[in-house]
Amino acid sequence: MSDFSRRITHSKFDFFLSVDCEGPIFDKNLENNVLNMERFLKLNTENDIYTLLFITPYFAMKLDELNLIEKIKNEYLVVFGLHIHPNNLPEHIQEKCSFLRDDLHLLADYNYHEQKEIINNCYEYLHKLSINPIEGFRGGYFSIDNNTVDILKKNTDIYFESHNIHRKEYKVINANHLISSYPVYSKDAYNEFRLEYFESEKLISIINDALLNNSKVIGITHSYLFDDKDFHYKRDGIGQSIYSRLNDILRYIKFKNSK
Ligand SMILES: [Zn+2]
């Protein structure tokens, strides 16, 4: 059992941070964001926190271009996952999936056979760039259904999915999951532990509840916030940077653990 598997399944409080590593669909300054990624990984790793990186093929391509894949594997506490926006795939994958449509944004908009083609091609591409092992899966906009889970189980080594299970795009029904579900910490569709949604104070109060209940917290954020000068901060009215919020959270966890 890996250190991550042990920590995610034990019965005590623990904190993990997941990142949807997007690509040009959201990262308008993809290179800047990728170049700021290590700052984020370093902060988590120094505090003994795993970062779960859900990576799209476009983001993988940029990591490869900037020669960062081996470095990330060797220097930081990370778990790799696959992230897919079917309307934002590199040309070489699009060519193999001639059924793709620009107006379909969710993976679960596609049938079993089509999803299988999309997933297999993306999974193979990340492997080809030595992004491995790939342990988790998160659909773009949290889209996943029973077909997705079945395909992941039969065709990949992915053993968990991570979504906000309260969103309507989460369509996995039946509790007998073929793969494990390690959801984003959330009370409902939008009350989720998302660094860009809340200021430190609110995030810390959520951590405090989780500590009291011995729950795990899997937080979420996005690659387009790695660069704290990215236009998303201004556009979305995000006052404090994700680093500042994360620092406050980590300091609080450290303080609680020391007592
Ligand atoms: Zn996404």
Image (cartoon, rainbow, N blue to C red):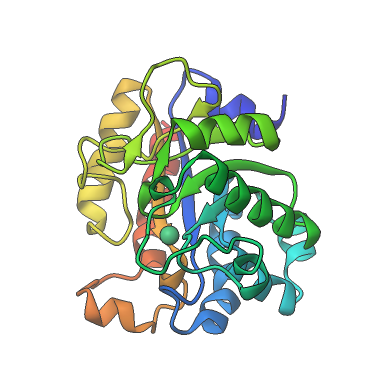
Specify whether residue 81 is in view.
no
The answer to whether 125 appears left or right of 34 in the picture is: right
Quadrant (top left, top right, bottom left, bottom right) of the C terminus: top left
Residue at 56% x, 61% y is 56
Picture quadrant where residue 197 is located: bottom left
**Residue depicted at 26% across the width and 56% down the height:** 200
Residue 143 coordinates in the image, percent (x, y) = 39, 46
Residue at image location 22% in from the left, 74% down from the top: 236
Image x and y of residue 146, in percent:
45, 30
Q: Position of residue 190 (x, y in %)?
A: 20, 47
Residue 158 falls left or right of residue 111: right
> Which quadrant: the N terminus?
top right
Rendered location of residue 36, percent (x, y): 55, 75
Q: Quadrant of residue 136?
A: top right
Nearer-the-camera pick, 42 or 102: 102
Give me the residue at 34% from left, 60% from top.
245
Whether residue 252 is visible to the viewer of this picture, yes or no, is yes
